[in-house]
Image (cartoon, rainbow, N blue to C red):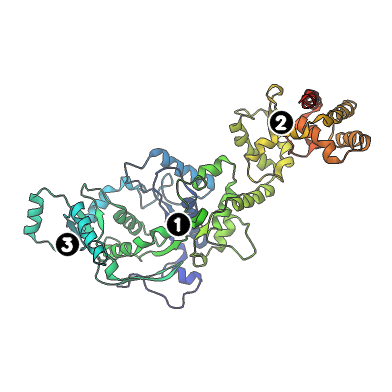
Amino acid sequence: MRVIPVTDGVDSSDAFVLGDVAAKDVRVRFCPSPTGNPHVGLVRSALYNWAFARHFGGTFVFRIEDTDAERDTEESYEALLATLRWLGLDWDEGPEAGGEYGPYRQSERREIYADVATKLREAGKAYRCYCSAAELEERRDAARAAGKPSGYDGKCRDLTDEQVAAYEAEGREAVLRMRTPDETVTFTDLVRGEISVDEHNLFDYVLVRANGHPLYTLVNPVDDALMGITHVLRGEDLLSSTPRQLVLHEALRELGIASGPIPRFGHLPLVTGEGGKKLSKRAPESSLQLYLDRGFLREGLLNYLALLGWSIGEDQEVFSIDEMAEAFDITRVNAAAARFDLKKAEAINGIWVRNLDVNDLSERMVPILQESGLLAHPPTPESVELLRAATPLVQERMGVLDESVGMLAFLFVDDDAFTLDEGDVAKVLKPDAKPVLEAAQSALEALDEWTTETIEEALRVALVDGLELKPRLAFGPVRVAVTGRRVSPPLFESLELLGREKTLARIEAALPRTEASTQT
């Protein structure tokens, strides 16, 4: 059985990808389960589907697969909505947006699944299976021992009425199994090319549990069929279920439950971590919350995730999602696993940080600085003005926004809360730093005008020319005394923003630290 025609001479043109579907009729879906925190693999799938829909001017459907009452949570559901909103991946149909194929939460579609299951059983496309878990395992073990496939052996496929009555008299409960064809299923994967699965590896699979709860194997294809989904782009880990889903799609059309073409499938490469293993949902770097907490820009994160399996061009790694959508070609997705590289993600994000307008960047830094306690909720007008002035000093030095906390803390902490990094004190505020600080203090006290230019000139004359010190040795003690760290934004600009009073007070407070070094 060839469920989807196999095209010879596959090329990367839109015509091949579309098949018999008009571009405007393209419908793809993003259908996560609301369990736990969203992870980067999930976001990558959402991005690719969004770009695919936008490329063709089609429809991006957001659907929630929440039939697992034990694991699904409303908190996770709200997090999914918030994630797509933050990322800017707008959906055309789904929760909040509505649409003609709703409801878009599977927990609200149970009657639909029950009706479809009944029709499949009545038409002989599915059947009740009374095998117990112990019996199934015993037969699987025997098949494995004999070197045979260990899937379901079809024992209940053709039960007589008497056999059914006997099982039910025993009090056995039945699951509903799909009757798979005794034929090879062949389809063309948009990423991996032609794939065939013969009848010996196609087993009758469960659609509905004995308690009546429908499984993913039923609800996912049914929703795709009834919602008119034309293309399914999903992770490689789901590839093994595709032949079974195609069998169900075929049955739904034979029974008149669904119409239109069977979806074309494309399976995206796995996202791997260290050692080439699939990036676990429990791995810290897989959680989207990590990137929110660290202050990744949505533009930078999406740009990097887009590169996990696809590129816009050989020499271009930085692009917007709108540029991605314009150029997106699913057949150019690499089938090989894509390794998640946190350092590269930070580097890509850093490029976006540097390309932002200063006012835009300063506004995006506000939540990070509020979370750290450096800014109030809401921030005062004075602190906002100071942040805007300080942003150019750190913009070229940041890869992610949480780095601004350490760089800018010296500007926003109260004097009684200001502290010096003890490791930097030990390395820089040694006994020979005392005359440097004293000379700097005298030079700065004498200034009539407090600007970057006058501060730089005064310190260079006093320390480089007067004390004949190299700039690193001249300015290092001043930097630690005033900012608390050896690494800080540009010194002279920092002193101007900090102000004369605080600068001189911090130098004065740091002088005893050099004496402490002498005593030590």
Q: CA distance from mark 1 to mark 3?
A: 43 Å
Q: Is residue 381 above or below residue 296?
A: above
Of callouts 2 and 1, which one flags the residue occurring earlier in the amino acid sequence? 1
Classify residue 388 by image quadrant.
top right
Residue 118 visible (yes or no): no
Residue drawn 72% across the image and 46% down it: 396
Residue drawn 61% across the image and 49% down it: 346
Q: Are marks 2 and 1 in contact (CB under 8 Å)?
A: no
Q: Residues within 10 Å of mark 2 (few under 14, many from 20)?
A: many
Of callouts 1 and 3, which one flags the residue occurring earlier in the amino acid sequence? 1
Q: Nearer the viewer, mark 2 or mark 1?
A: 2
Could you say whether the residue bearing mark 3 is in a helix, strand or loop? loop
**What is the three-letter code of the residue carrying label 2?**
Phe
Position of residue 427 measured from the top left corner of the image (x, y, whole percent): 75, 35
Query: Is residue 257 rendered to the left or right of residue 377?
Result: left
- From the image, tell me which residue sits under label 2: 410
Could you say whether the residue bearing mark 1 is in a helix, strand or loop? strand
Query: Is residue 453 rendered to the left or right of residue 479?
Result: right
- From the image, tell me which residue sits under label 1: 59
Residue 374 visible (yes or no): yes
